[in-house]
Image (cartoon, helix red, strand yellow):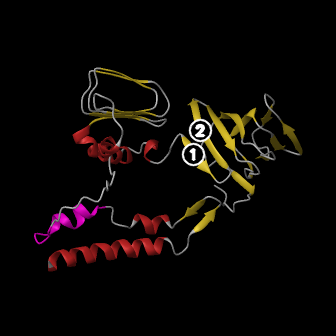
Amino acid sequence: MASIGIVACCYSRQVVTSCSKAVIDVTSDLDFIRVDSEAFAACPDDSIDYAVMENTSDAIVVPMDAGWNDIGSWSSLWDVSEKDTNGNAVLGDVILHDAKNSYIRSDNKLVAAVGVNNLVVVSTKDALLVAHKERVQDAKRIAEKLREDGRSESELHREVYRPWGKYDSIDNGHRYQVKRITVKPGAKLSVQMHHHRAEHWVVVSGLAKVTNGDETFLLSENQSTYIPVGAVHALENPGKLPLEIIEIQSGSYLGEDDIVRFEDLYGRLPE
């Protein structure tokens, strides 16, 4: 058993060292704890199966029924999920016909499946995954391909959480982007400006306290304001209920790095 001990020791030492370095200088912004990304990225990304068990001939496996499932894949979720009479685990707006032994989940739209067997189908706001249950672990190859091709999906999500709430990029095209912004009660976005884009804000629900240039005013449901390019502005929720607005951006560049912050409750540096 000496070889497995040596392999496991070396592997665990690398993991502990990397994770320890990552939490030395953590920063916090309300609900979020930010670790040192470079140190954490240095942590080995191999599972114990690949890093330890496949590198020893001295291991012993003892069967045990502990009621535990690692749920390390979509197929594992199928294993532990409640199933219909045809062996399908379904979550969300899903309609099936002659489908068997499949895991089908939809977070945002109707998914219809006909005549399928042993599949994993997962529809989110970001992407649609269709895989055979026995090959679903190979989805990581798609993730690697996204990174190799420089696709934005490898790093960005449609729905993004911030200390003050979240935003959902519901539409975009040439020189425009539409977001649904949710601001928590008492929260405030940074005082900021943009060099390349203008914004229209329409309040869907709640109460908004808006700073637009030299003016500060309140907006309620169905009211709106226009933020010109270069105008210093801020958005705050002074109410007791979540504030939801639709933000329509237009301009020559709509990247998140076109933000110049002047004040921020959460200590974030300028983009």
User: Which residue is more in the foreground, 156 or 254?
Assistant: 156
Q: Amino acid under label 2?
A: Asp
Residue 184: image x %, image y %? Answer: 70, 47
Residue under the point 69% across and 63% down: 267
Q: Are marks 1 and 2 in contact (CB under 8 Å)?
A: yes
Q: Give the left or right position of residue 264, taking residue 99 as reference.
A: right
The extreme left residue here reads 57
Residue type for callout 1: Val
Can you say whether 195 is above or below 47 in the image? above
Q: Secondary structure at mark 2?
A: strand
For image coordinates 43% across by 71% down, the residue present is 19
Q: Which residue is mark 2?
A: 168
Give the alpha-carbon distance from disc 1 to disc 2, as whole Å: 6 Å
Query: Is 203 rendered above or below residue 33?
Result: above
Q: Does 74 sit left or right of 178 as displayed?
A: left
* Residue 233 versus residue 271 in the image, above or below: above
Residue 54 screen position, x and y as percent: 17, 63
Q: Which mark is residue 151?
A: none
Write down the residue under mark 1. 160
Q: State the quadrant of the C terminus.
A: bottom right
Q: Quadrant of residue 97?
A: top left
Q: Which secondary structure, mark 1?
A: strand
Point out the stretch of residues depicted in magenta.
46-60
* Image spot of residue 206 (x, y percent): 77, 37
